[in-house]
Amino acid sequence: MWATGVARDTWYGTVARPSPKPPSFLPRKSDRMTALNHTHDPAARSWVASANTPGTDFPIQNLPLAVFRHYQEDEAFRGGVAIGDQVIDLARVVVVGCLDGLAAEAALAGAYHNLNVLMALGPKAWQALRHGLFDLLKEGAEGPKVEALRSCLVPQVAVEYNVPAQIGDYTDFYTSVHHSANIGKIMRGDNGTDPVLPNFRWIPVGYHGRVSSIGVSGQEVRRPLGQYMPAGATAPEFGPCKRLDYELEVGMYIGQGNALGDAIALGEADQHIFGICLLNDWSARDIQAWEYQPLGPFLAKNFATTVSPWIVTMEALAPYRQAWERPAADPKPLPYLDDASNNAEGALDIQLEVLLQTPQRTAAGAGPVRVSQTSFRHQYWTAAQMVAHHTVGGCNLQPGDLLGSGTISGPTPSEAGALIELTKGGREPVTLSGPGAPDEQRGFLEDGDTVILRGWCEKAGAARIGFGECRGTVLPARSVA
Ligand code: CA
């Protein structure tokens, strides 16, 4: 379908890699990842019974992707698609040959140890894979190819996951106006002036982050050591971070990128996003407060970032698009960040929550406690605007690049996406109250705490889809020599 580049040998054969810039990959308007089609039918059911369970994250309308292998087995990671409580093994899909044409080509690309080759194939291929699997998985489907697909199912309880892409570059944005206002007051004082910096309403603010410390859900995060300036002191101290925090974010994986020097127009930006995951941008607030001026976060952020294993595709999210709005008094975006499609359907209503599990609760056999709940729809800038802004100066995005949304905080205090906001800089600790264990207080995270992010989309007239979870646990700092 497109010019091919370097061939690559794998255990199942030789796969052609896509050229850096294949011609005309964009689907017709009606096939775009934002359009609704039969794969969104809320009445659709699967012969995989667990996919029909009310409240499941992975019904037939979702079909998110991850890379997985059998738990602690000496075997290669490969791509998989979630259906109910099962994973469809894409490497086995290739072996049994239950898909045809572009869908088969996409499955082959997804059988690598990461999803970069599939990401590079572009939205026509992603759509072919989704639709091919949907047709085989739906209730009533029968025949040898359905039976062949049945042999590709692996129970999710029997697998482990890896970071799903070889991430070349990771950028973290700062696109919640509520987070920006809350943090502005805490970092710079509440002095009656606008706590939101003047550039925020014109620019999707971001910084270039660190890839090497990105881990998948289940990551154990060692409390970082670093410098911080105690209040009233004249010289910094060095030691374990005392104000360790999480940030509730979503991550966007880039599919096809752009050539160096080119830009991705706002109207095309969604076609360049492979899908969305949950992301925890662990943050050392005391280290951050001392180091962040003038160049932004550094050691406060580079010790760990945790992502969910599952990537929900833009096509699966299509029913949950909604109008993107900002207050009438705010500036109209510059032309490269403004178009009718983004205004009409640029926002995504992804509901999100943060839960904490503490050592005390674990010891008592009690489950985690929810500390906040909000939605991605509140962000001041959309995913498409982030992509358009990132590339407008000629920066090239590449398949597998990861863009973080920035902390997602909603308009009310209980919708704050980080402890520093929930606790007003640690001054007003939150009470963790739930059945099965005594109440506890938290200003910031303590050793042994597990942060759990969850996300889902749900509304009348559409199937509920979910993101699974993104989980990470705080380990004690290494000893200071
Ligand atoms: Ca962040």
Image (cartoon, rainbow, N blue to C red):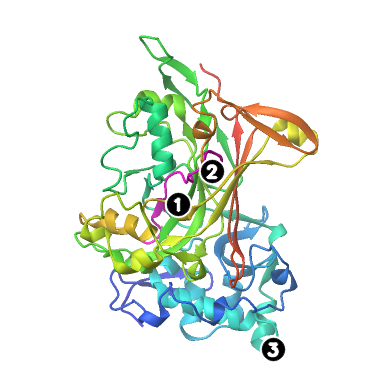
Q: Are marks 2 and 1 in contact (CB under 8 Å)?
A: yes
Any mark on residue 415, and which? 2
Residue 228: in sight, yes or no?
A: yes
- Secondary structure found at label 1: helix
As measured in the structure, the alpha-carbon distance from the residue carrying label 2 to the one carrying label 1 is: 10 Å
Q: Earlier in the sequence, mark 1 or mark 3?
A: 3
- Tag 1: residue type? His
Q: Earlier in the sequence, mark 3 or mark 2?
A: 3
Mark 3 or 2: in front is: 2
As measured in the structure, the alpha-carbon distance from the residue carrying label 3 to the one carrying label 2 is: 46 Å
- Secondary structure found at label 2: helix
Q: Earlier in the sequence, mark 2 or mark 1?
A: 1
Between 325 and 50, the one nearer to me in the picture: 325
Q: Main secondary structure of the magenta part?
A: loop
The crowding category of the residue bearing disc 1, from other C-alpha atoms within 10 Å (few below 14, some 14 to 19, many at least 20), is many
- Tag 2: residue type? Glu
* Residue 430 figure quarter: top right
Q: Position of residue 449 (x, y in %)?
A: 64, 34
Segment colored magenta:
399-415
Residue 75: in sight, yes or no?
A: no
The crowding category of the residue bearing disc 3, from other C-alpha atoms within 10 Å (few below 14, some 14 to 19, many at least 20), is few
Does the magenta run of residues contain 406?
A: yes
Mark 1 or 3: in front is: 1
Q: What residue is shown at x 48% (from left), y 86% (from top)? A: 101
Does the magenta run of residues contain 400?
A: yes
Q: Assess mark 2: CB under 8 A from ligand 1? A: no
Q: Position of residue 358 (x, y in %)?
A: 69, 34
Q: Which residue is mark 1?
A: 378
- Asked if 243 appears above or below 120 in the picture, the reply is above
